[in-house]
Amino acid sequence: MTPIHSQRKRVLSGMRSTGKLHLGNYVGALQNWVGMQDQYECYFFIADWHALTTDYADTSQVKQNSVEVCLDWLAAGLDPERSVIFIQSHVPQHAELHLLLSMITPLGWLERVPTYKEQRENIAEKDLGTYGFLGYPVLQSADILIYKGDFVPVGEDQVAHVELTREIARRFNQFYKLRSKEVFPEPQALKTKAAKLPGTDGRKMSKSYGNTILLTDAEPVVRQKLKTMVTDPARVRRTDPGNPDVCPVGDLHKIFSDTETNAKVDVGCRSAGIGCIECKSWAADSLVRILSPMQERRKKYEQNPRLAWDILEAGSERARKVASATMNEVRDAMKMSLEFEAPGSAQGAK
Ligand code: TRP
Ligand code: SF4
């Protein structure tokens, strides 16, 4: 294992354990993470406790889902030699810090988080009126602060959570100091320049819409999914000209195809010189070109599933070391260290 250079800024991010990942997860986060590994000291974890905030009633898939996410990460190019890759629930210190941060977090801050109301209303089939769901952003703050992350690469929807993390860090630092120094640096969100990736029905690609292309989809599956993909509704007949700027397949080309192909699509679509079937087959070519090296890399882990688990265990071990060092500081700052103190000798400024 290459030693981690402490001069490098630390990046930390997590993903809920939702099972197999799709292209939207890739362009929205994973691709970006893969590219950060040389420049930063990276911690990437599978947020299985966060998955419980909505899926608490049936936990039978949680562990398997974590492994699936890990396989997709490794396939996409996250490298355990360079990054610490682990499972949140294997580092119990996250829960300990979450508890302490929950003591100092005003309820109003949590009720104001935009995703809170939104999701409670949108996910009507589950009862999200739980303590854990309200506290989701506090757990996320603990995840970030326990590694003293400098940067947190996230999508637009998570920026408010990183903002809240900064506020919680500030509040902690105001209450408690360690040898008159602040314990937690304020992390900064690195917003992913997310190209909006449409799914096969033209809406945003999302597991809940059933419109995804998975990183594990084999070539025939990709081609079949592309065939069913919606196109510019103005192009009813082959002879009708279309507009790639309002076509989901056009969006795929912009994200995944080279400039030459994009030029062919643009001219051909607008002049009705090409048909949608042909255009879609080019889009499928581009997707296959991205996916096949991932699927190739994945084989090694699929043949020996133990490998991925070993990586997660080793990563969790490294993460626990860092996390427990932070917790020692937290305990010290809060005057609740594990060291013996004679009764009555209230600890002064240490
Ligand atoms: N809430 C994030 C999401 O749903 C996942 C997450 C959990 C996370 N803890 C984190 C992201 C810490 C960044 C940092 O995508
Ligand atoms: Fe969309 Fe391509 Fe058909 Fe144009 S030719 S409408 S870009 S699928």
Image (cartoon, rainbow, N blue to C red):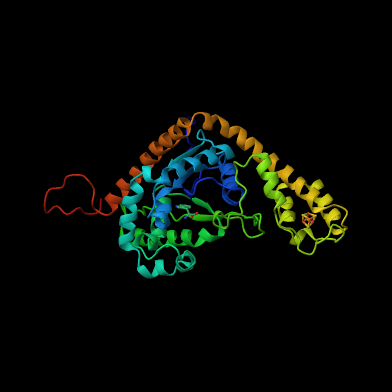
Give the image location of residue 105, x and y in percent: 35, 64
Position of residue 349 relative to residue 78, above or below, is below
Between 192 and 291, the residue placed more toward the observer is 291
For ligand 2, give the image quadrant. Answer: bottom right
Q: Residue furthest left?
A: 343
Give the image location of residue 87, x and y in percent: 42, 43
Between 8 and 123, the residue placed more toward the observer is 123
Position of residue 66 relative to residue 177, above or below, is above
Q: Is residue 298 left or right of residue 177?
A: right
Q: In this rendering, does residue 145 appear at all?
A: no
Q: Residue at x 85, y 53 (%)?
A: 268
Q: In this rendering, does residue 221 appear at all?
A: yes
Q: Residue at x 76, y 61 (%)?
A: 232
Between 69 and 95, the residue placed more toward the observer is 69
Give the image location of residue 127, x and y in percent: 39, 64
Give the image location of residue 117, x and y in percent: 45, 69
Q: Residue at x 15, y 47 (%)?
A: 341
Between 205 and 221, the residue placed more toward the observer is 221
Q: Is residue 263 left or right of residue 112?
A: right
Q: Is residue 301 left or right of residue 234?
A: left
How many numbered markers are drawn?
0
Residue 139: quadrant of the picture? bottom left
